[in-house]
Image (cartoon, helix red, strand yellow):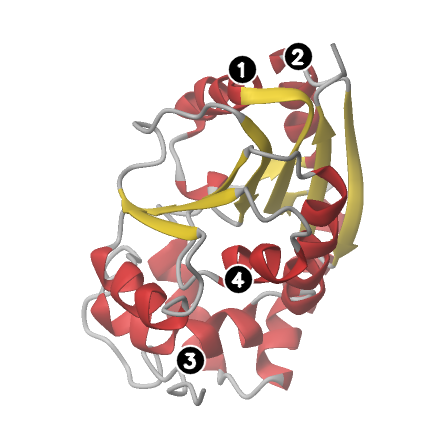
Amino acid sequence: MTHKRDSLFARPLQDIVDFNFNTEVAQVFADMVKRSVPGYGTVIALTGVIARHYAQAGSLLYDLGCSLGASSLVMQHHLEQTDCQIIAVDNSEAMLDKLRLNIRHADNILPVCADIRDIEIKNASVVVLNYTLQFLPVNQRRELIEKIYHGLLPGGVLVLSEKVLFDNSNKQELFVNLHHDFKKANGYSDLEVSQKRSALENTLITESVSTHRQRLLDAGFSTAETWFQCLNFCSFLAEKADA
């Protein structure tokens, strides 16, 4: 499948509004995320490997903030259990319209248009939050993580991938600059990098690795390990202990 190239911020914008996952973004999202998030392809691919390892027969797998369904599809591809269902949740109808095209041959993926804070999580062996928690207000993140924990079966796992903030200001500046260089190496101009950064300023709020890990442990997870990092993007693997 070919994807439209992202040029949403290529022209000077008089008014830069807060970033949202509208129809325009949905049209270019596959290209945008590939060129903007270092390590994205590796995280998605290994999400499928992790899902195969942790999926329990007859359980549900959740892809929260599923966008175009990349994590859902890779989990579906790797699943060995035929009686599992993947619940793909997003609050953007534009994203879900594209997702439905992507999963039209995957009978065990159920798209749900909803706010991830409002859905019930139950009988879950795997929950995926890839680059989603960062868009929620900080004061609402603990409640969601706790809900995920309680909805997981013993031995279940949460995959949490986020852009992160470094406590050391020099280190933070270094990795921000390297991230911008990464995007420019992928064809984005200085103008595009600057304007998108402004659009995300109020909607994507980063936290430190230690903050994420402590929140996971406080929610009840027995382990919360950083299994992948590329520049200022990390992914955590949080396990719920066996009963």
Badge 1: residue crowd in 10 Å (few <14, some 14–19, many ≥20): some
**Residue that label 2 marks:** 220
**Residue that label 3 marks:** 191
- Specify the quadrant that holds the C terminus: top right
**Residue that label 1 marks:** 150
Task: Give the residue displayed 70% in from the left and 20% down from the top.
Answer: 240
Count of numbered tags: 4
Up the image or down, 215 lies above or below 183; here it is: above
Labels 4 and 1: the sequence-earlier one? 4
Task: Give the residue displayed 34% in from the left and 60% down from the top.
Answer: 199
Q: x%, y% of residue 81?
A: 64, 46
Up the image or down, 3 lies above or below 71; here it is: below
Up the image or down, 7 lies above or below 236; here it is: below
Labels 4 and 2: the sequence-earlier one? 4
Q: x%, y% of residue 20?
A: 28, 56
Give the mark toward the camera: 1 or 2: 1
Instruction: State the SS at label 1.
Output: helix
CA separation, marks 1 and 2? 9 Å
Labels 3 and 4: the sequence-earlier one? 4
Badge 4: residue crowd in 10 Å (few <14, some 14–19, many ≥20): many
Q: Which mark identifies residue 26?
A: none
Q: Which mark identifies residue 73?
A: 4
The disc labelled 3 sits on which kind of residue? Answer: Leu
- Contact (Cβ within 8 Å) of mark 4 with mark 1: no
Give the mark toward the camera: 1 or 3: 1
- Contact (Cβ within 8 Å) of mark 1 with mark 2: yes
Front one among 241 and 236: 241
Labels 1 and 2: the sequence-earlier one? 1
Instruction: State the SS at label 4.
Output: helix
Task: Give the residue displayed 44% in from the left and 90% down from the top.
Answer: 2
